[in-house]
Amino acid sequence: MSFEFLSPEIIEQIAQKYGYWAVFFGIFLENLGLPIPGETVTIVGGFLAGSHQLEVQWVLLDAACGAAAGGTVGYAIGAKGGWALLTKLGQLLRFKESQLEDLRRKFSENAGKAVFFGRFIALFRVFASPLAGISGMPFWTFMGYNVAGAITWASVMVGLSYFAGQVVPLEKLIDFATQFAFVALLLVAVAIGLPLWLESRKKDEEILPSVTKDTETHTTV
């Protein structure tokens, strides 16, 4: 997730100044929900490795460790008190508790895939781990998907920026990664939201005839 007040040039200066620490804490803090462009910092780290300003193996290790550590903290937050926070947020957004229960159930059925592939999806990268904790996903099962997803995501992001950065401008790489992440988010939102909406409509249609029938019965009496 990138922000206008942090241009690629500024992020590059931060990465040049703080090196591997910038990569680790960038993605770690983003996973905690803070407005830090962690993915962009990681791409910049790979880009600097491609220009021999950093060592690619250390950039890769920092990115993977930062993602895995941030995900672990997110899981702990979700497991400890995430459901209470989610229901409060749902009330503000006018979601019924039954809808949130359906969401938790559907997430639980696909928790492993969500944690692994969520790394590549804007915003979902932040919420996948807490949702895993909320859904009651066993910790060590979560850690398996969390670590595997972190390593895969870091390998793709750092590898892409390391090799492609030698022929493609940094700004183009960041734009491509950002667009891909938000397109993926849109597809996931449709895939999750559409079935829930259809299921909700089906329930309403099932309830309506029953209510109508009861009303007609009382009117007749």
Image: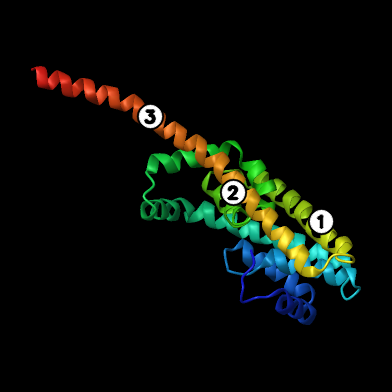
Q: Secondary structure at mark 1?
A: helix
Q: Which residue is mark 2?
A: 186
Q: Judge depth for marks 3 and 2 and give the one in front.
A: 2
The residue at 27%/22% (across/down) is 210
Residue 94 x/y as whole percent:
36, 50
Residue 103 seen in the current view: yes
Q: Residue at x 61, y 70 (%)?
A: 3
Asked which secondary structure carries label 2, the reply is helix
Between the C-alphas of marks 1 and 3, the distance is 44 Å
Q: Earlier in the sequence, mark 1 or mark 3?
A: 1
Q: Please provide percent x and percent y for residue 37.
A: 66, 68
Mark 1 and mark 2 lie on one chain; the one further toward the N terminus is 1
The type of residue carrying mark 1 is Ser
**Amino acid at the residue labelled 3:** Lys
Going 78% across and 58% down the picture, which residue do you hit? 157
The N terminus lies in quadrant: bottom right
Contact, mark 3 vs mark 2 (Cβ under 8 Å)? no
Q: Nearer the viewer, residue 183 or 130?
A: 183
Disc 3 designates what residue? 203
| Residue position for label 1 | 155
Of labels 3 and 2, earlier in sequence is 2
Q: Is residue 86 left or right of residue 29?
A: left
Which kind of residue does numbered mark 2 sit on?
Answer: Leu
